[in-house]
Amino acid sequence: MPSEQHTNIKVAVRVRPYNVRELEQKQRSIIKVMDRSALLFDPDEEDDEAPSNRTATSPKRMNKKLTMEFDRVFDIDNSNQDLFEECTAPLVDAVLNGYNCSVFVYGATGAGKTFTMLGSEAHPGLTYLTMQDLFDKIQAQNDVRKFDVGVSYLEVYNEHVMNLLTKSGPLKLREDNNGVVVSGLCLTPIYSAEELLRMLMLGNSHRTQHPTDANAESSRSHAIFQVHIRITERKTDTKRTVKLSMIDLAGSERAASTKGIGVRFKEGASINKSLLALGNCINKLADGLKHIPYRDSNLTRILKDSLGGNCRTLMVANVSMSSLTYEDTYNTLKYASRAKKIRTTLKQNVLKSKMPTEFYVKKIDEVVAENERLKERNKALEAKATQLERAGNSGFDPQELKPWYSKIDAVYAAARQLQEHVLGMRSKIKNINYRQTLKKELEEFRKLMCVDQRVCQESF
Ligand SMILES: Nc1ncnc2c1ncn2[C@@H]1O[C@H](COP(=O)(O)OP(=O)(O)OP(=O)(O)O)[C@@H](O)[C@H]1O
């Protein structure tokens, strides 16, 4: 039986260094990293390492002087590699052990979410490092396990769910027994790390970006990169399906801080609406409430299983240390503190694929054998009854036969029940075989569709 454990969402905070604009404006630092897991928000003048940085334009000091604890705090000199080694490499092991995992980055525009998730050529981000590690580990286990890997890359832009890997219209979300499903989304099969990273780059190039005041290359959509892996144990044919999701959320800035107008304002409003819905879900989950309003936005519908489902989740809260982003940083840290309280339930995903049929075949053999045995016993009892009847005709008391008659009736009833059971089992087997045939055909069809799509993609 797969075991079940409860665990809290892990929250890491990453502080980014000053950018040129912040340096030019000589802003004071509103974050002081205390140690590996604590920071001081809005420190006192004497805690402030650069008091001379204060200018007349600096926002008024609020003196919150809040000490906040997280699972890990990464300071300005920590690299993407540091985050990978401490936070996402353990998730790769968990995925290969059959647990769904999610990583999402949260923070204001320009706070370093995309830098953390995607990085650059010189500083590869978490997605790149994690995928590389995943494929290295897959390669190392190839002798004992077979891996089928498929990826999808979606963006939620103005509440529309778009496929970043193929050019198609908005996709619809629907719910089934396995959770929220994106209708018409076809996974792209992947056979190597290079191919996977190519898909990632292709998706990134399709992502909606526009400059804002705070970030020249601001991502205006939420991006969800998912790797679906079917792991087959070569020895036992036991299968597990697991999912690793890497989510780069759009900036959580207040609409006013980016001064958007027209289309940009609509974007900002939509981003804020979905992040507000995310905040509501985080608050309710942290309070342990039963009803969580996932349906309030497409983003929260997609993140449902990462937040409240069967998933090991890591949230990276990105913040800048500059007082220019005082409110946004404070809000991000408040969100992150709330998220730390969310508990998820972890179950190892195990799907026994061939077992049920074998199991039922064995069971039917047992039932048929039992039926034969009862028939024999029945025959013997009938013969005995006839004998007794004859004996009764020769002066035997018929009352003595009564218990034998009821025994015979009971045997008949048991035999009838077993026969019904056998019929039931046979129809179950038929159903299973039929379902398996359909599944195979569906997989073939999907593969064909994927090949078609890739051919189309390549020819564009
Ligand atoms: N830790 C860091 N070290 C060095 N540079 C960084 C770091 N974090 C972010 N930057 C730089 O800051 C700028 C903004 O970062 P990024 O695009 O990642 O922000 P973002 O949070 O994704 O913003 P948006 O929500 O607008 O997309 C980029 O030029 C990026 O290279």
Image (cartoon, helix red, strand yellow):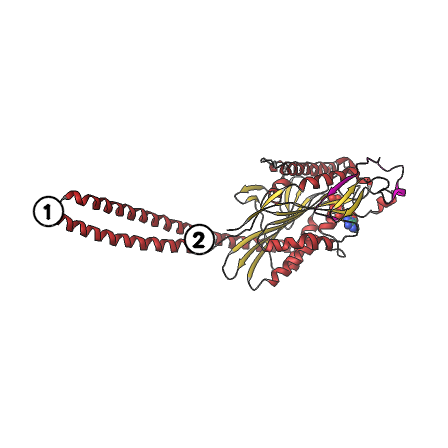
Closest to the camera, between mark 1 and mark 2, is 1
Q: Is mark 2 within 8 Å of ligand 1?
A: no
Q: Position of residue 401 (x, y in %)?
A: 18, 45
Is residue 206 visible to the viewer in this orientation of the structure? yes
Residue 368: which quarter of the image? bottom left
Nearer to us in this view, 55 or 393: 393
Identify the residue shown where x is 52% and y is 52%. 350
Which amino acid type is shown beneath numbered disc 2? Answer: Pro
Give the Cα distance between marks 1 and 2: 54 Å
Left or right, 310 with respect to 405, comes to right
Considering every residue shown, the one lying at the far bottom of the view is 143
Residue 228 within the segment the image draws in magenta = no
Q: Which tag, 1 or 2, sits closer to the chain's start?
A: 2
Q: Position of residue 449 (x, y in %)?
A: 55, 53
Which amino acid type is shown beneath numbered disc 1? Answer: Asn
Nearer to us in this view, 346 or 436: 346
The dot on residue 356 is 2
Q: Position of residue 143 (x, y in %)?
A: 56, 64
Q: Position of residue 226 (x, y in %)?
A: 62, 50
Q: Is residue 113 above or below residue 239?
A: above
Tell me the chief SS of the magenta region.
loop
Q: Which residue is mark 1?
A: 393
The dot on residue 120 is none
| Disc 1 element | helix
Please tell me how crowded label 1 is: few (under 14), some (14-19), or many (20+) other residues with Cα within 10 Å.
few
Q: Read off the magenta span.
A: 49-73
